[in-house]
Amino acid sequence: MSIAAAQKKGFGAFLWDYLTTVDHKKIAHLYLIGGGFFFILGGLEAMFIRIQLIAPENDFISAGLYNEMFTMHGTTMIFLAAMPLLLGLMNAVMPLQIGARDVAFPFLNSLGFWLFMFGGILLNCSWFLGGAPDSGWTAYTPLSVESPTHGIDFYVLGLQISGAGTLIGGINFLVTIVTMRAPGMTYMRMPLFSWTTFVTSTLILFAFPALTVGLFLLMFDRMFGSAFFNVALGGNSVIWQHLFWIFGHPEVYILILPAFGVFSEVIPTFSKKRLFGYTAMVFATILIAFLGFMVWAHHMFTVGLGPVANAIFAIATMAIAVPTGIKIFNWLATMWGGSITINSAMLWALGFIPSFTIGGMTGVMLASAVADYQYHDSYFVVAHFHYVIVGGVVFGIFAGLHYWWPKMFGRILNEKLGKIGFWLFFIGFHLTFFIQHFLGLMGMPRRYWVFLEDQGLDTGNFISTIGTFLMAIAATIFLINIIYTAVKGEKPAGDPYDGRTLEWAIPSPPPYYNFKQLPLVRGLDPLWIEKMDGKGKMTPAEPLGDVHMPNGSILPFAMSLGFFVAGFGFIYQTDHQAWNLAIFVGMGIALGSMLIRSLKDDHGYHISKEELEREAD
Amino acid sequence: MSHDHSLNPETMPQEPEKATLEGKNKFLGLWFFLGGETVLFASLFGTYLALRNSTAGGPSGQDIFGLELVFLMTMLLLTSSLTSVYAMYHMKNNDFKKMHLWLGITAFLGIGFLACEIYEFYHYITDFGFTFRSSAFGSAFYTLVGFHGGHVVFGLSWLIALMVRNAKRGLNLYNAPKYYTFSLYWHFIDVVWVFIFTVVYLMGKVG
C-alpha cells in the first residue's frame, strides 16, 4: 500500500500519505511540524506578555487579555510544544536506536499524534470563540470553575483529548522497547536516549491519568453541576491542586529526561568518547523518575498542609539534586580529555550545562519550605522554571534537532546560521530570565498585569523584555535555516558525524523498513564497536527475508476528528441543548471508527525478499 | 494475508495469545494500560475518600446503601471473572465452542451486574433524592462508581463485538490475543469492584 502511495506524485497523494501514515519516521515529521507550530504560537504569546511588562503601568494589552496570554503561553508551551517536539524526536530516533523496524503499535502511534493535534487545535479555537482560558496553566479552582467565558471549557476538553494521545504514545514506546529490541540489544546496551524515552514513557503512563481525573472533575463541575470544588455543597478546592500536581510534577521530568537523553547522545559523539558512567546515568534517570512522583506537594507549600508534610516533601525534593548532579558530572567527565568538535548541536549541549545548573540551584532554594513562603508566586519562581525548561528542555530540543536533522530529513542544517542562532538565543535567554530572579526577590509577583513605577522594578523588566527579542530573532533564524537547508542544504552520507549508535548504521533518511536485516548488537555503542574492530558496519543477525509492514489507515484521523467535534458539543451544550447533537455525531464518528478498526482484519503486508534485494544498500 | 498459514495452525501453540509478536505486544500493552488505569482509579478513590463525609445535609452512605443488593452485584461480577477464566482455559485447549459458551455466560453475568447498578442508582435518585448534584459526596460517589460502570459497559461492548465478529471464524493466532486481552481487562474491572465494595459500601455502612 505505502509503496504505491509513495510512487504516486502530486500534492493530494502526498497529503493523503501523511494523513494515513503509520510510519514512525513520518509521524515524527508530523509531531515536529505540529509542535513547531505551537512553539511559534507560544512564543508569540510570550512576546505579548513581555511587551506588556516592558514599562510600568503599560497598557499594551488589557488585563483580561493578559490573563489569557500567560495561561495560553504556559499551556501551549508545555502540552503542545515541548512534549510533541520531544515525542517527535523519540519517534524519529528511538526505534532506529534499538534496531527495530517500527514501533509496537504503528496504528496507535498515528492515533496519538492526531489526538494531540486535534486537542491542540480545539484549545486554540478558544481565541476566536469568546476568549481563551484565563486561570493560569494550572487552572486552580475555584477560579477556573467561576471563569465566565468558555475558555476553561476549551482548556478541559483540549487537554483531555491531547492528553489521551500522549498516554497512547507512552504505552506504545514502552511496549516497543520491551519487545522489539534487536538481537543482542540488552537493556544495559541501550543508548541513553532510548533509556530516557523508556523512563519518560513510564512517567507518562503513571502521571497522565491523574490529570485525566482532575480534568473530568473540573468538566463535571463546570458543565454538569457537580460539586467537587463547590465549598457550599461540601466540595474541596485542594483536591484539584493535588491531582494537578500529582500529574504536574512528573510532567516536568517527562519534559527534561528526554532532553537529558539528547545530551547524552550529543556529548559522547562530539567528544569521541563513550558516555562516562553509563550505568550511573541509567540509574540516575530511574531515580529521578521515582523521586519525581514523591514531590508534588512542593508546589503547595503555602496551602497549609502542615509542617510535617512540608518537611517531608522539602527533603524529597532536595534529594532529586543528587541524581541530577551525578548526570551533570558525568557529562563533564565525558568531555574531559575527549577530542571535542564544536558545532551547533554541541553548542546547545555546552550552553545547557551551566544554564540548567543555575535552574537546579534555584530549585534547591525553592525546595526549602520555609524560604518558599517568600518565593512563592514571585518572579523568582518564574525565573527558576524557565531556567530548567528553556535552559534544559528547549536547549535539548535544539541540540536534538541539529544532531538528528540529517537522519530525519536527509539534509544537514547550516552550521553558520545554527551557531549565530545559538549565541543570540543563549544571550537573550540569560538576559530575559537571570534578572527575573532579582525582580522576584524584590517582590514582583508573577501573573500581574502591571507594576508600579519607581519600585526598583523598571530597569529589570526592561532588560528582561529586550532579551525576549533576541530569542525571537534566534527562533526566526532557525526557521530561515530550515528553509535554507530544505532548498540548498548539503546532503549527508548515512553517518555524517562519525556516530556511535545504530541509527547511524543506515542511510539518511532511512528506508521505510529501516533495517533490511536486523543488526546484531555486540555491546554499548554498537556501531562504534564495529568501527573500532575495523568492520565499519553492522553484522546482520538474520538472513535476508520478507519484511512484515503495517498498513496505513485514515481511522486515527477520523477518531480524533470525532472527539474534536464531540468536544465542541460538550463545551456548548451548556448554552443550548441542540449542541448535544454534536456530542452524538462526534462520539458516533469516534466510536464507529473504533468499531471498524476492531472488526476489520488488518494483517499488514510483506515486502518480499526479492524486492529488498533490488534496493541498493 | 488472511491465507497466512502461520495464523491458522493445525495445532494451537501452548499460549496462542503470545505466539506472535503482535500478540505479545497487545498482551504487554494492555498490562501497561491497566497500570495507567490503576492511577486513574486511585485518583478517583482519593477524591471519594476526601469527600465521602461532605454530604451537605443530604443523605449519607449510612442512610442509603443496602448491602443485600451490593452483595448480589459483587457475586455476579466475581463469578463473571471466574467464567472468563474458564473461557481462557478452553482457548488454550483450542476448544472454540466452549470458549464462546463461557464468554457468553460472562457477558450475561456482566449485564446482570449492570442492571443491578442501574436499579441501584435509580433507587437512590427517586427514593432518597440523592443525585450527582446534591452534594460533594454525591458527585464523588456517582463519579467513582459510574467510572467503574462505564468500564463494565465498555468491556461488554468489547466482548460482544469480539464474539459476533469471530462467531463463524473460530480461533486463530490473530484473534486469540484479542480474547486474552479482554479477559485481562475484565479481571481488572473485577479487582476495582472489590475495592469499591470495600471502600465505598462496607466503609460507608459500618466504617
Image (cartoon, coloured by chain):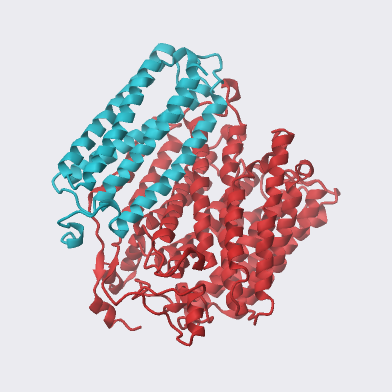
Chain colours: A red, B cyan
Q: From the viewer's perspective, is A219 left or right of A348?
A: left
Where does the N terminus of chain A fall, quadrant-wise?
bottom left
Above or below: residue B118 compared with residue A60: above
Above or below: residue B161 compared with residue A327: above
Most foreground residue, B87 or A80: B87
Q: From the viewer's perspective, is A608 left or right of A239?
A: left
Q: Residue shown at 69%/55% (left/top)?
A: A321
**Quarter holding residue A294:** top right
Most foreground residue, B108 or B117: B108
Residue A516's x, y, as percent?
34, 76
Single out the residue that lies furthest toward the bottom.
A534
Most foreground residue, A281 or A149: A281
Residue A270's x, y, as percent?
60, 78
Residue A257's x, y, as percent?
58, 59
Residue A333's x, y, as percent?
68, 72
Q: From the viewer's perspective, is A370 left or right of B130?
A: right
Q: Is residue A103 visible?
A: yes
Above or below: residue A215 compared with residue B113: below
Q: Residue shown at 38%/35% (left/top)?
A: B189
Q: Is residue A425 visible?
A: no
Above or below: residue A305 compared with residue B93: above
Q: Residue shown at 33%/29% (left/top)?
A: B77
Looking at the image, how many numbered discs can be counted on the residues?
Answer: 0
Where does the C terminus of chain A fall, quadrant-wise?
bottom left
Q: From the viewer's perspective, is B14 left or right of A44?
A: left
**Quarter holding residue A572:** top left
Most foreground residue, A528 or A139: A528
